[in-house]
Amino acid sequence: MITYIIVDDEPLAHELIEEFCGMLPHLERKKNCDNALEAMQFLSTNTVDLMFLDLNMPKLTGFEFLKTLSNPPKVIVTTAYQEFALEGYELNISDYLLKPFSFERFIKAINKAVGSKSQPTHTNTDTKENLRFYVKGDKKYHQINTQDILYIEAYGNYTKLFFEKGMILSHEGISHYETILPTINFLRVHKSFVVALDKIDQIEGNKIIISDHKIPIGQTYRNLVSKLYK
């Protein structure tokens, strides 16, 4: 579960963010703050994973507030002022949502902010990481657990995500998934393929066998793959 707070002086902004977050079952709201001082007081005794932060607030701006935090949560800036974007990235924010923003753009910001926030699985090993994120496919948003992915395949500007019980065609490119998937679990073995290491059944010549699927190993990736068994 990803916990979050909203820091914004506009009631309509709170309503929109709450509505969008309510559609994502892995997000849990902890606090609504109307200004930075209220958020500062809350965070002095509480911790959250994610903060939706407005910039133009009275007494203390969003960035001024952010600079006071020694260990801030992941931050998604929500503002109507595009000119502050550069300063935000210098403060290592996760994403910058320009009001008004769509649900699709909101999903991308969530994936960017918490997609890299890995959570341990309930296994007997510390060498695996598990995370969940949303993928748009077939006009729906699918919640994906990385432990369920067999491999992914580039498909033009799109990506196919393969599972035991089917496939989802995503509108994101393969480089997007190579970025957000935990490198301890996934390896790019071809310019068009990324595989889940724990799903590999066999490595045979220049192919990787996963269940009934045969994934080619690209010439430039052979040394990386060979390290799995040497």
Image (cartoon, rainbow, N blue to C red):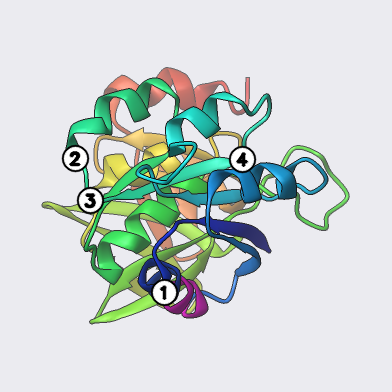
Q: Which residue is mark 3?
A: 80
Question: Do tag 1 and tag 3 residues touch (Cβ < 8 Å)?
Answer: no
Decide if residue 141 is on the left or right side of residue 201: left
Residue projecting furthest to the left: 156
Q: How far separated are the C-alphas under marks 3 and 4?
A: 22 Å
Seen from this angle, which residue lies furthest right?
Answer: 124
Distance Cα–Cα, label 1 vs label 3: 18 Å
Q: Which mark is residue 73?
A: 4
* Disc 3 secondary structure class: loop
First in sequence: mark 1 vs mark 3: 1
Which mark lies nearer to you, 2 or 1? 2
Q: Secondary structure at mark 2?
A: helix
Look at 48% across and 39% down and name the residue there: 59
Query: Which residue was labeled with disc 1?
Result: 20
Residue 101 placement (x, y as % from top left)? 24, 63
| CA neighbours of label 4 inside 10 A, class few (<14), some (14 to 19), many (20+) | many
Tell me, yes or no, whether the two marked residues, 4 and 1, touch with CB atoms within 8 Å. no
- Amino acid type, label 1: Phe
Q: Which residue is mark 2?
A: 82
Circles 2 and 4: CB atoms closer than 8 Å? no
Mark 2 or 4 closer to N-term? 4
* Of the image marks 4 and 1, the number of the one nearer the N terminus: 1
Picture mark count: 4
Q: Give me the residue at 26% from left, 60% from top.
A: 105
Q: Per the image, is 22 magenta?
A: yes
The first of marks 3 and 4 along the sequence is 4
